[in-house]
Image: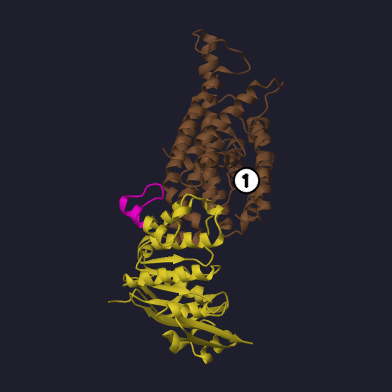
Amino acid sequence: MSASLRASLTLLGLSIVALAAALWLGPTPLADPFARDDITRTIVWDIRLPRALTAWLAGAALGLTGAALQGLLRNPLADSGVLGLSGFAALGAVIAFAFGFATFAPAMSVAFALVAALLVTTLGWTSRGPASLVLIGVGLSSFAGGLIALALNLAPNPGALADLVNWTLGSVEGRSLEHVALAATLLVVGAALIFAAARGLQALTLGEEAAAAIGANLSNTRALVVLGAAACTGGATAVAGVIGFVGIAAPHLVRIFAGHDPARILLPSALAGGALLVCADIVVRVLPTDTELKLGVAATLIGGPVFALIAARLASRGGDT
Amino acid sequence: MSALLSCSNVSVELGKTRALVEVSFDVQPGEVVALLGANGAGKTNLLLASLGLVPFAGQAKLGDASAHALSARDRALRAAYLPQRPQAIWPISVEALVALGRFAHGAAPDRLGPIDQGVVEEAIEACALGALRRRRMDEISGGEKARAHLARALAQRAPLLLLDEPTAGLDPAQALGVADILRAYAAKGGAAVFSTHDIALAAETADRVLLLRAGRIIAEGTPSVALTPDALRDAYGLSARLERIDNGFAAIFER
């Protein structure tokens, strides 16, 4: 069995355990999550299950996107959050909500994530070293943040403001099976696109010129990853808001066990992202805080230091990838 | 037999600099051709233009097709290319890196058919990488990395090898080892074009040399005919001569 298959199976197992734990653990202690009384059934199957599945799907989408973007841009610091895809996806959804066409929020998320993906891959394609690419992402993220604030200011429906602000912090609270279906559909579409680019990502290990010289069609690879990243990030952001760092952390964790082949870490990164976010959401729910900590905030609290560590290690190696 | 590579009036412009000016040459099967010239003379751009990897004017044909018209895969089946500074961005294993040479043949490093596996084995053996095959690319020395990347290019099994300074950074024994590999490649009906700053090695290894200066070919032919003191002075701005010694050549420079 290859290391990547072993990692995938392990992470699939962990995902299942985490999802089961998410049904059982929560602010309301349950002795038996499979009890047949109405209250238990409502808590477990109507509240906790959609919430846990939404967290898993969003985490998987972000983990997969992180692995794909890192491979495409040959940059270990790349992910939807850092490169501004999540910020743009949130902007798209905020515009849809604030101006009263909420049904189009997911489509707007995907479309805006696509714009960010195109911008960052075009501007960052030839960037020297990981830092300059990250700076492009920081620029896009701040720009998206500014436009979100502007959209909220101009919104004709200020009643929704508080909800929207909360939502830009990232949360899977109160999600329904409709959210699950939406995130799952976009994850399947995005994953199909990204897995079609897997061999191109493998070739890019040699750098752009040599990848082209061994026969990789790089414009194809790039288009597939950009579209796939937009679908995955748009879907994840539409159902869970902005959740940072899962996309960075998942591939890095996976490489420890599954090696560095950019094609072989795609599936385990998705599974790891899902498991990570379900676990983070369990922590958020069982923490005895007065108001529930937002999942996106928790992810940042854990992921931020991880990002800083990776960046510091890169810097100590001379900053080049 | 028809030429594996034929360039006619190939020019490359990088911004306002003319990196290559109407260069024409052919490479026939069985030939080893060395590209010589000072830094910035146009050696790298000549290799890149041959592959259609930089925009150029004129015509470059790989076999019977224009380099521009070929798909990436078809191009890779006709010519293998080793860049001047080959990269392994992710620390994959030596074996996996060599296996990337089979990309155009439809093989992935983790899924090699028996033919691909055989070719990869041969390339690993030719470059003496047997003991290193499972090591990660970031755990081996510079010379070993260079050999791994050369093995990757060999595993591509294209009729034409285009190598940009394949012996840079190698010790003399390893550099001669690379020269032997190129000769063997040509002996089997392939052809190799390589750039180098090692004039003696070029003279020893190549059937033909192209001496470049400022994007133009200023001398061409067998090493002892083309590499005259005048031509070398033109190319490098130094008094230089090539001397035949016992089994090979020595290049002697004077200020």
Residue that appears at 56% across and 85% down:
B252
For chain A, give the colour.
brown
Which quarter of the picture shows residue A213?
Answer: bottom left
Identity of the residue furthest to the right in this view: A290
Which quarter of the picture shows residue B126?
Answer: bottom left
Q: Position of residue A315 (x, y in %)?
A: 68, 52
Work out whether residue A54 or residue A13 is closer to the camera in this orientation and state it. A13
- The kind of secondary structure element at disc 1 is loop
Taking the magenta stretch, the answer to whether it contains residue B111 is: yes
Q: Which residues are magenta?
A: B105-119
Q: Which residue is mark 1?
A: A82
- Residue B166 visible? The answer is no
- Indicate whether A158 appears above or below A33: below
**Quarter that holds the N terminus of chain A:** top left
Q: Position of residue A221 (x, y in %)?
A: 45, 53
Instruction: Specify whether B47 is left or right of B38.
Output: left
**Protein chain holding label 1:** A
Q: Position of residue B56 (x, y in %)?
A: 46, 74
Residue that appears at 36% across and 69% down:
B185
Instruction: Specify whether B50 is left or right of A152.
Output: left
- Residue B50 visible? The answer is yes
Work out whether residue A218 or residue A214 is closer to the camera in this orientation and state it. A214
Amino acid on which disc 1 is placed: Val
